[in-house]
Image: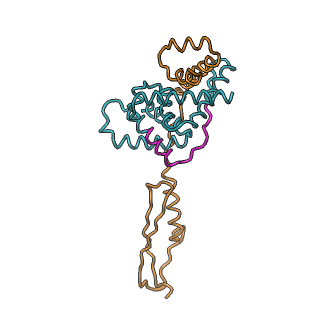
Chain colours: A cyan, B orange
Amino acid sequence: MAEHQQLVLRTAYRLLGNLEDARDTAQEVFLRLLKHAGEIAGEPQAWLYRVTVNICMDRHRRRIPSASMEREPADHARDPEQTLLFEERKRLLNDGLAILSPRERAAVVLRDIEGLATREVAQILGVEEVTIRSHVAEARVKLAKYVRGRR
Amino acid sequence: MTCQEWEQRLAEAEEPDSAADEHLATCPHCREFACELEANAMALRAMRDEVLEAPPRRRRWIPAIAAVLVVLTITGAWFRPHRPPMTPVRTQKTLMVKMLTPDPDVIIYWLIDTKQGESE
């Protein structure tokens, strides 16, 4: 259950850019899970991703305000200078998610952060694989330019 | 192909692309872009391992306590000793108090009996 909670919270946070909104979304997702528990066959992972993305998209459409991307704790296991650069890149990428369209953001979060296959992302978002490939590529180009422009 | 088109192709690539490799060998601009994509991919993957705080429990008892205090204040029951009525009570009305709480699912109602005719 804790793993599922992290999955929802992490995805919502990347899509909304705000931990408070992500927590609200997580509560809504798990309320829906309780309501529909009997209808979900097998692992609820795909269902959780789909509902999380849908709720985040709804929030985006309703323009529920979200603050700027919050900072993450640093990983001190590496060389300090490399850690600093790596954390800076993560911070920039986190900020850069905000410049993507909601579709691009959902695609890149599920594909590149959550590590799902293109086919799985297509099923969750209800579009063709070719569309996902295009959204992900577009998002990667925008993020690369965003990061390069700020370093 | 222009460098912009190569950038798109590099970003889409999920499998080795020999044509792209040949272009990268001769184009420093696209080589730099490919390095950027690779570094970003690593950083994005690392973002998955970050643990975020779980949702806090909602404190439903706070509005409930606030509501009790409000009712006690309204009815005057807050530490008031019992006094016998000076005159017989003639009429009695019921007052309904509705209190909205920060949680939209929680609405608290009270029915308060108010005695009239004491001052008449």
**Residue B7 lies in quadrant:** top right
In the rendered image, residue A16 lying in the magenta stretch gets the answer no
Q: Position of residue A7 (x, y in %)?
A: 46, 32
Taking B39 as reference, is B82 left or right?
A: left
Residue A45 seen in this snapshot:
no
Residue A134 seen in this snapshot:
yes
Residue placed at 62% from the left, 28% from the top? A145
In the rendered image, residue A60 lying in the magenta stretch gets the answer yes
Which quadrant would the N terminus of chain B be assigned to in this image?
A: top right
Q: Position of residue B96 (x, y in %)?
A: 44, 70
Residue placed at 48% from the left, 34% from the top? A106
Most extreme residue toward the front is: B1
Q: Position of residue B118 (x, y in %)?
A: 48, 84
Taking A132 as reference, is B51 left or right?
A: right
Q: Give the residues drawn in magenta, as a range.
A: A52-72
Residue placed at 59% from the left, 32% from the top? A94
**Residue A119 lies in quadrant:** top left
Taking B81 as reference, is A84 left or right?
A: right
